[in-house]
Image (cartoon, grey):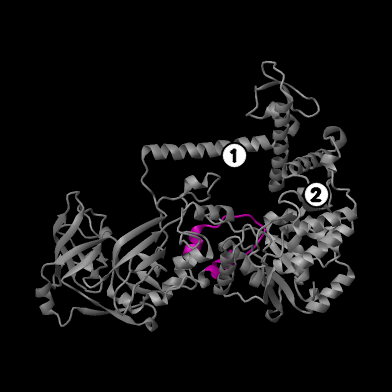
Amino acid sequence: MSSEESINANALSARELEWAVNSEQLLAEQKQINGSIVRTRFPPEPNGYLHIGHAKSMNMNFSLAFEKLGVAPENRRTIFRYDDTNPDAESEEFIESLRRDLEWLGWKPEKTTYSSENFQILYDLAIKLIKKGLAYVCDMTKAEMEVQRELAMKRAVVRNSGKDPDIDAPIPSPDVLPGRNRNTPVERNLELFEKMKMGLFAEGTWTLRLKMDFESSNPNMYDLVAYRIRYTRHPHAGNGWCVYPNYDFTHGICDSLERIDYSICTLEFETRREPYYWILWALDMFRPKVYEMSRLNLQYTVLSKRRLLKLVINKYVRGWNDPRMPTISGLRRRGYTKDIINSFCNDIGATKAHNVVEMNKLSQTARTFLASTSRRCMAALDPILVVVTNFDEEAAKEQSMTFEVQNSPTDDSLGSHDVTMTSFIYIDANDFRLKDSSQYYGLAPNKAVGLKFYGGNLVCDKVHTDSDGKVTKLEAHIDKSEGRKKPKSFITWVPSNGFEAEVRFYNNLFSVPEPSDQWEDELNPESEVVYSKAMVDPSICEVVDAKDVDAWKSNYALQFERMGYFCVDIDTTFNSETKQGKLVFNRTVSLKEEVFKKELTAEEEKAIEARKNKAKNDLEEKEARMKIDPINLFREGAQYKGLYSKFDEKTGVPTHLADGTELTKSAMKKLDKEKQKHMKAQMKWKKQKG
């Protein structure tokens, strides 16, 4: 890394490895090329749309990392790289969306690169590793590799406990470990790899693996696959390749080729430090500093690309840009601006501490920005027609029934618009009740409320309902008399020349703060509530027109008085000149934090309580299970107690059922697999705890 003397290098320090140490020559080369420049990179995979977790990563790589390091602005550089090594999951649509979202958020990369543009270099480096005896072509199946890695892990656990792996976890055959292909001669490996490249083998038959370390405690060092055969056209590189490098082999090499100083990723990649640095060590290439930060976990949503893809494929949402999605495109469509998103990411920062950010923090950031920038107008989501019976009489007393209304009470520069009182108006159904109460300040039969901007009272005289008892029309009179009773509240209204609109109310996508493995059952059925016959005041035609609406920009934002902040949706077809077409608005966020309490049936409450109890019991059982020594799993594990009577003294695997029946070899093999899974889960659990 160049210019270390002028920055706080410890600000992004992490676990050190022997392989990560650069030689004096490599350091000198890096300094000669970079000079005083400090370079990071943002390398998303084009296998989906960017989400708010990526926004945090962009904020870190383009800004916060340099702030932490104390790098002068003129010395900051960030490369935007498409990590496009898996053509099966990538598409031109995703590639284009990544570019547009990055630009929209305002980040300016030093340059844009593609891992696929290094395919020839990567292939040549793979040849180099083969010639050095550090890579080999392998025909082991996926199932065989899993058995191999489970055995290597088992031996590592035994070795770390101070026991002899050759006794407690013996190798049944060298074909299993280290594997039948590991010692293939270099010439034969070169020949096979060339045939892989030429397309002479079927998919899944051969891979190129790195000759790493089967005695490591890190499973990522168990001879990772570097290349696979894939007969898939690459969306950027085209049809030139049928062998594709894997992520672990590619991203470290690309970091080094691009002269990256700091390679920043999330904590789930912490165990990938070993292969990252081993590969660069084996190739004698410059090793950037790797720093892992906690990933963004946001309440009431999911950020797993696998789950986001399922939401789209199963049509739980309208698409990748659905306003309920945590994607950048979804947030933009909902009305979140780049300033809101970047400010939110800056506020939450980047550390190694695992945490779940409250959704209200994002909502409150939005309110802070939108309050001062949004134009105001009136709307009725579920409109009730109100006929003003004494309109002509009252209008005759006034010079005009048209009033000038400020577009913002705090910013005169936003201008004003006119609102006209008419002989019939619309009010929102939430502002009327058939039965009044002392705690209710809205309109009710024989009760007066104030009409915002008009200044007088509205008194309900008569109620019309349909056969189902739903209110369809009110008859009321307006009162501006001197001695009129002062109303407890003023309600909003829409004049008769208002426009019909579709208003989409968006709530949390999930009904629980932290969705579980049963996340599809936890989707909020009221995450989108559509008011298809809403009415908005006619001033919107001054600012809303379909020709100005674009999926890749922030569309016009409005505050519907007393209802929340909204923006124009891309489904809008309204023409402001002809006054024809459809108006569609999305609610971005409420005016203040809302506390929703859905009325549940007794059955729903019982089911929720049962899920909570099950989740609690499952967690307690897992905690207890993780504390069990693998050799005692079938004796002490709650799910196994009482099932078996005899056990293998060395392995702990059951040999007889409780009734004395001897287990078959197949049954014992399955139980041994259960034990291996337990060992793997226990290692992961201990790492998380420690």
Can you see residue 282? no
The kind of residue on which mark 2 rests is Cys
Report which residue position mark 1 lands on.
Answer: 619
Quadrant in the picture for residue 504: bottom left
The image quarter in which residue 638 lies: top right
**Marks 1 and 2, the one that precedes in the sequence:** 2
Check disc 2 and report its element: helix, strand or loop.
Answer: strand
Residue 605's spot in the image, x, y percent?
A: 41, 39
What is the spatial separation of the Cα atoms under label 1 and label 2, in whole angstroms?
40 Å
Which residue in the rendered view is the most extreme toward the front? Answer: 200
Q: Does 518 sit left or right of 444 as displayed?
A: right
Q: Residue at x 81, y 28 (%)?
A: 650
Viewed as shown, does residue 20 lie left or right of 114? right
Q: Which mark is residue 138?
A: 2
Q: Amino acid at mark 1?
A: Leu
Q: Which mark is residue 84?
A: none
Whether residue 532 sits left or right of residue 292 in the image: it is left
The question of residue 337 being in magenta is answered with no
The answer to whether residue 110 is seen in the rendering is: yes
Q: Nearer the viewer, residue 63 or 81?
A: 81
**Residue 354 painted magenta:** yes
Q: Quadrant of the N terminus?
A: bottom right
Q: Residue at x 60, y 60 (%)?
A: 47
